[in-house]
Amino acid sequence: EDCPALCPEDPVPIPVEHPDGASGPLFAGWSPNVDAIAVWTGADNGATLGVVSPRGGNIAPIATTVVRRSWVQWSRTGDRLLVVGGHAPETGAPRTLLLCAGAAGCSSVTGGDALVADPAWSRGAAMAFVSTERRELWTANRDGAESRRLAPAGDGVHAPRWLPDSRHLVFIRDGFVWLLDTTAGDAVAIAGPLGQARQTAGESPQGLNDSSQGARWE
């Protein structure tokens, strides 16, 4: 109901073609260059991620994913996506980090055995992600190569985000917001405790699990 105030122009319908019996398209995000829209379609749970032109037409399927918008991340130039690939939303379910070149297809960054979550692009096209076995923080270059664990971040990391300098990361751990220089130094707590951790005096702050709505933050 806020659309007339926020968007004075008339909405433009986009005709989308997808298989009969599939769910309706669920919005996953515009590419930064506004050349494509990422959407989910699929039976029941919308688990097939695809891209479609803003002019409409066929959805080009690219990956099977957990339906969670923060786990589909366009690069700054809009030429590729980081996607958490998988079939089930439960914590511990098999997942991999996919690097997708639009409709051209995807390749695995982490291999088939690693469990991942919370991908993020930097402005300099480096990537960050969380390995979910112990929720460790990792980075890699724009092609997914030269991956390395950032040991100073510790375990229990959630929702990493790059600062504009493409050097520092902020993330949630133990109910606090932490800042880390990826080139050197230890992580420093800069805010918190957050949410329930703030309300529970005398107890250890709790992090966010994979299914928590609070894992999306800015």
Image (spheres, rainbow, N blue to C red):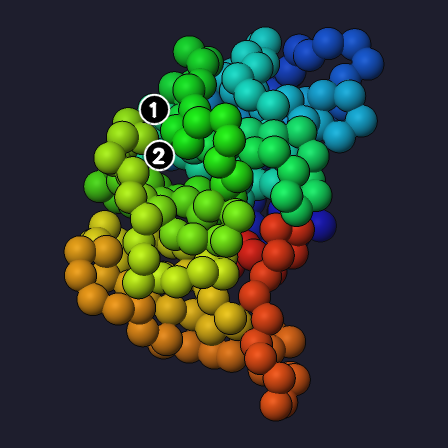
Q: Are marks 2 and 1 in contact (CB under 8 Å)?
A: yes
Q: Is residue 27 visible?
A: no
Secondary structure under tag 2 reads: loop
Task: Residue under label 2, please give it.
Answer: 75
Point 46% across, 45% down: residue? 131
Residue closer to the observer: 25 or 108:
108
The mark total stands at: 2
63 left or right, relative to 109: right
Secondary structure under tag 1 reads: loop
- The answer to whether 166 is drawn above or below residue 168 in the figure is above
Task: Residue under label 1, please give it.
Answer: 79
Q: Is residue 99 visible?
A: yes
Hey, which residue is sitting farthest bottom in the picture? 202
Q: In which quarter of the image is residue 28?
A: top right
Point 20% across, 66% down: residue? 185
- The answer to whether 158 is drawn above or below residue 191 in the figure is above
Which numbered circle lies on residue 123? Answer: none
Point 23% across, 61% down: residue? 181
Q: Quadrant of residue 215?
A: bottom right
76 left or right, relative to 83: left
- The amino acid sitting under disc 1 is Asp
Task: Indicate the position of residue 125 as horizontal and vertical percent values.
Answer: 26, 37
Residue closer to the observer: 91 or 198:
91
Task: Indicate the position of residue 3 as horizontal and vertical percent values.
Answer: 63, 47
